[in-house]
Amino acid sequence: QVQLVESGGGLVQAGGSLRLSCAASGSISSGNAVGWYRQAPGKQRELVAAIIRGAGTKYADSVKGRFTISRDDAKNTMYLQMNGLKPEDTAVYYCNVVSSLGYAYWGQGTQVTVSS
C-alpha cells in the first residue's frame, strides 16, 4: 500500500507558475508509472503528464511545452512544474502511482485555480 500526499496547489493569475509535489509513503522507483491527472468541474479525469517505465514521458497536448513532470526517487517524490498557466488549467490535480504489479494508487488531490 502506497499513500500519496499532494501539495503546492493554489490560486494564481494567468501566465503564472505553480509547482505541485507528491510525496509517497513508499518507493516509487520500482513501479510501472508515475503521473499527474486533473479533473475540472463537470469533466472526466484526464492525464496531464506521466513517466512510464520503458516509454519515457508523456504529456497531454494541452500542456506540452508548459508543464514538466519529474521525480526524485531518493525522496520518493514526484513533481509537476506548471508554467504559463491558463484559466482552462483550473482543476483538481491528482498524483498517481502504478506499482510493478499493476495496482494504482491516488493522492487526495490539490486544487489549482487560474484567474484570468
Image: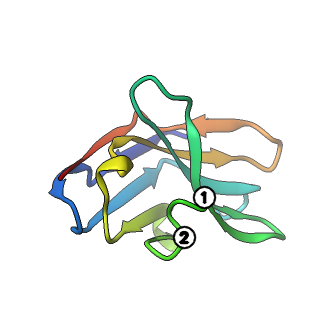
Looking at the picture, how far across and down is residue 107, in whole percent?
A: 46, 38
Say which element carries label 1: loop
Q: Which residue is mark 2?
A: 64
Residues at marks 1 and 2 touching, judged by CB atoms closer than 8 Å = yes
Horizontal arrangement in the rendering, residue 35 relative to residue 98 (left or right) = left
Looking at the picture, how far across and down is residue 31, in whole percent?
A: 72, 55
Going by the numbered disc 2, the residue's amino acid type is: Lys
Going by the numbered disc 1, the residue's amino acid type is: Ala
Q: Which residue is mark 1?
A: 60
Q: Nearer the viewer, residue 114 or 99?
A: 114
Horizontal arrangement in the rendering, residue 89 relative to residue 46 (left or right) = left
Looking at the picture, how far across and down is residue 95, in whole percent?
A: 50, 47
- Residue lying at 35% horizontally and 58% vertically, measured from the top left: 20
- Residue lying at 39% horizontally and 27% vertically, measured from the top left: 41
| Quadrant placement of the N terminus | top right
Q: Residue 10 — which label?
A: none
Q: Nearer the viewer, residue 28 or 86?
A: 86
- Residue lying at 62% horizontally and 56% vertically, measured from the top left: 34
Say which element carries label 2: loop
For disc 2, the neighbor class at 10 Å (few under 14, some 14 to 19, many from 20) is few
Q: Nearer the viewer, residue 33 or 37?
A: 37
Looking at the picture, how far across and down is residue 79, in whole percent?
A: 43, 64
- Indicate the colouring scheme: rainbow
